Image (cartoon, grey):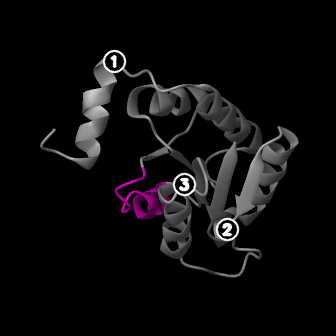
Amino acid sequence: MRIAIASDHAAVELKATLREYLIGLGHEVADLGPETADRVDYPDYGYKLASVVADGTAQYGVALCGSGIGISIAVNRNPACRCARVDDPYSAALAREHNDANCIAMGARLTGVDMAKACLDAFLSTPFGGGRHTGRVAKLTNPSC
């Protein structure tokens, strides 16, 4: 899979760890930055991540900041993105199965490395359930569906 990953300064270390983890699993990973822990604004990196998922350059996105909240809001500003902020593998799997999420967000100050890896595993291995969820997901982009 082609996966893009981006963070703010608070999540640079988690981003680097997850990037290497994903590469080790055989995924093609685009690291959209930042490269250092110097202070940056999470919306800039959330918008960058959303752009490459929306244009198809990446199939999925991984968005990280201190809490995962701010960067997920930024990613979700792009109507082509459905970014779910998750804390555990179950919520990560439901984000894919029920909401066809194409991006996952986590907080480096709240989620440990092992839990973040487990969330990624659940997210990437769970297909969209379709069926009754299809119409609901369509309404996320077009409320008149």
- Left or right of 52? Residue 115 is right
Residue 145 is situated, as x and y percent measured from the top left of the image, at 16, 38
Quadrant into which the N terminus falls? top right
Mark 2 or 1: in front is 1
Q: Which residue is mark 3?
A: 56
N-term-proximal mark, 2 vs 1: 2
First to last magenta residue range: 69-81
N-term-proximal mark, 1 vs 3: 3
The secondary structure type at the circle numbered 2 is loop
Residue 88 is situated, as x and y percent measured from the top left of the image, at 58, 32
Q: Give the CA separation, mark 2 to mark 1.
A: 34 Å
Q: Which residue is mark 1?
A: 131
Query: Residue placed farthest to the left in the image?
Result: 144
**Residues under numbered marks 2 and 1 in contact, where contact means CB atoms less than 8 Å apart:** no
Query: Residue placed farthest to the top in the image?
Result: 131
The residue located at (27%, 44%) in the rendering is 140
Amino acid type at image mark 1: Gly
Q: In the image, is residue 64 above or below residue 103? A: below
Amino acid type at image mark 2: Leu
